[in-house]
Each structure stands twice: as C-alpha cells, then as structure tokens.
Image (cartoon, rainbow, N blue to C red):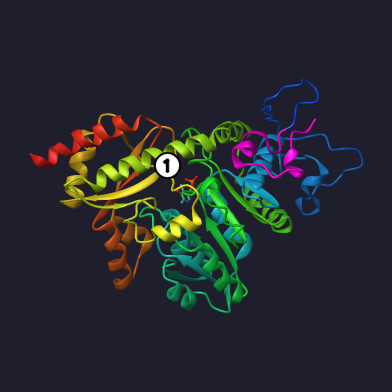
Amino acid sequence: MTKTPGKKTPQHISTKALHAAEEIDPVTGATTPSIVPAASFVPPKGNKIFSAYEYSTDMGYSYSRWASPTVGLLEKKMAALENGEDAVVFASGMAAATGLFIYKLKAGDHMALGNVGYPGIAEFAHHTLMKFGVNVTFFDPSDLGEAAAAIRPDTKLVFIDTPANPILRLADISAIAEITHANGAELVIDSTFATPVATQPLALGADYVMHSLTKFLNGHGDALGGVVVGKKSDMADLRTESLIHLGSNLGAFEAWLVLRGIQTLWPRMVMHQDNAMRVARFLEGHPQVTRVNYPGLTSHPQHDLAKRQMKNFGGVLAFCLKGGAKSAARVLEKLEVIENAVSLGKTKSLIYFIATDELQKNSFKLNKKELAKYMDWAGEGVIRFSVGLESPEDLIADLDQAMKVLEQ
Ligand SMILES: *Cc1c(COP(=O)(O)O)cnc(C)c1O
C-alpha cells in the first residue's frame, strides 16, 4: 500500500514530511522505513546492464553507488517537499553543490555566484572552478542592478543562497530568476537556511534547489547529507555525471537518520522561528549589542522581501557586539547552556564567531566596495547563533549572564 494520497489532494508540508513517498513494507507490514545497507542488488529479470550510461532509476536497483532504496526514499521525500520532479542525494551539502557544478559547467563557461554565502562554495569557485577554466563573477544578489550586470548572455549558471550565510542577507528569488532566464541561464538556490518550510524556490522560478541536509532537515546534528532537486531529465544526468562517477554517495544509515529528522521538520521550524524571534528582540534591546540581523525583525533592511518570500523566518540570526571580536570571545566563553561550535540547524543551540578578515582572506575575497557593504552587516565579525529548541527564557538568561562580562 502506498501512502502518497498527495497525488490527488495537495498536502500541507507537515503531512508530506511524515507521509510523502513512504510505503507500508509489503513483507513485514512495518510502518517505518527499513534501512537497506546492501551494496548490490539482483537485477529484475531481463535487466543485464553494466554501464551507468544505460541505467535509469526506473529499472530498480543494481549497485548502490547508482541508487539505493533508503537513499531513494529520501530523494523522493525531498522532491515532494520542494514540489520538484526528482532529487539526487549526496554525502554532504558540499558534495551536492560541487556535483551540480561539475555536471553543469565546463572550461570557458561563465557562472555568476553570490559574493556572500557558504564559504566552502566560495572557496571551491575561487580555487577549483577557476583552475578548470570556468569564469566566475561574484556579485551581490541583494542588489538587482548588480545582478543584471553580473548575469550575461554567456552565463550558464547563477548560484545564490538566501538567507545568506553568515549575515542573513536576502536575495529576491523571482527577480533573479527573471534576469537569469532572460540571459538563457539557469538558477540554483541554496535554500539550507530557509528549508522547504520557509521558501519553495522552484515555485519562484529557480531551476534547482539545493540543501545541506546536515542542517535543519536532519535537524539533530548527527548526520551529514546534501540534496539537489530539479527536473527529472536533469536529475538523471546529474546522477550519472556526478553522483555515480564521483562516488559522493550518502550511506543508508545516514539517509535513514535524515528521514527520521524530517518527520519533525515542521514543528521544529515553528519552534526555531519562535525562539529566534524572542532572542532577536532581546538582543536588539541589549545595550552591548550594536546590530542584529534576523529576517523576522522589522529592522532587517529587507524585512518586506522576507515577508513576501519566507513563510517562516528561520532559526539563525547574527549579531555584533560593542568591542567586536574581543567582546565576542569574552562572551562566548561565559555561556553555560549555548554550545560554542560550528554548524547550525540542530535541536540544541549552536553559536560561533565568524571573523570578517578570515572570511575575506580565505573565502570571499571581496573587492573594496563589496567588503565595505559586507562590513555594514557584519563589522569585524558576526556572532552566528543557530537558535535551538531549548526554552527561550533559558537561552535569553544564558546570553544575559554571559554579556555581563562586558560590564567588568
Ligand atoms: C552547511 C552548508 C553547506 C554545506 O553543507 P555540508 O553538509 O556541510 O557539506 C552549504 N550551504 C549552506 C548554506 C550551509 O549552511
């Protein structure tokens, strides 16, 4: 029995998170998906193919570097959550993004890339893509004039994340999609911070949406993963050219953990947002805080866009303290509940100071004008706070007691 009534009736995302693509196990009657760790599968009768170029997922399973049941269920679930035709799951968000670049781009091609975003992607563009002869223009996608200049008739791919790591700057997806398509290019949105609960980039005109599944989708900080969602024919080619040939596959156990995490995606995002809003308002009123970036605050420079484009303002905020990096180090050391570690989107709160000079030197390499714009949002660095599911009173009390060190 398949449990996909969504084929007839459009379902709410919270229902899809629980039911989409899942089936009652025909052998055991199990109501929870099984973990299938097999590396190879006896092919259905008549299927004797050996090359990945002859393979499609409709043929069943053959070798789990090509496709496998538990990962396949996660792919179908993610396609349903993003209202896309198909999805390919990778071992991490970086594997998903770089897999898409390798599938789409070749020497001589041009890509326009948001100049603020996940540092690993900026570094890959500066070093690896350029080494392979891809031309990359870095631009500020919050400025449509800059977008129109950066996206050219020879542009193949446009890649941006919104809200952008680590400053929560937004990009208008439908406006950028229009510029992209007018130039015959394709748009990729890294929607990791937004999640499918907040924003559905494909419905706004993006051609591909990618996520680090490591963050809010898994949600528990205990598995890595990545995904690209898009058209069926593109996903078939992405699978062959990138996943199968690079071998950046997610294992069945991790896929199962992510599937389990996704069951509670909706209620977690509702709570992450409520807690982040409470913490953001507290920080905004604190005398030691010079700036708070959170799309849900009316003080966010793009709050109107946030209201149009995001059904949920998310669980990540960034703030700056009087005294910059030195104050940040002193405060983070005093925290008793909130954990001082990288990453985001997990049940427990995570906080980390991200220094502007380090990002600038190793990852973003912004020109003078762009760096000045970045520093309007970040100063000499931001404290990125992934607000967890603890009681908001406890989180605020923890920040409040830690910030007392600045009065000494
Ligand atoms: C974490 C992250 C990535 C990279 O994902 P990994 O799973 O760590 O490889 C990409 N984009 C954004 C916005 C992220 O936060």
**Which residue is under mark 1?**
273
Say left or right for 267 vs 366.
right
Q: Is residue 348 above or below residue 354?
A: above
Residue 347 within the segment the image draws in magenta: no
Q: Position of residue 397 (x, y in %)?
A: 24, 32
Residue at the extreme left of the image, as rendered:
408
**Could you tell me which residue is drawn at 65 percent across and 41 percent down?**
77
Return the residue nearer the eye: 336 or 144. 144
Question: Element at badge 1?
Answer: helix
The answer to which image quadrant residue 69 occupies is: top right
Residue 386 appears in the figure? no
Residue at image point 21% right, 43% down: 329
Report x, y in % for residue 196: 56, 47
**Outermost residue to the right:** 46
Left or right of 76, for residue 351 = left
On the picture, is 395 further left or further right than 209?
Answer: left
Rendered position, 31 above or below 406: above
Question: Magenta residues?
Answer: 1-22
Percent x, y of residue 232: 73, 55
Q: Is residue 369 visible in this depiction of the protein?
A: yes
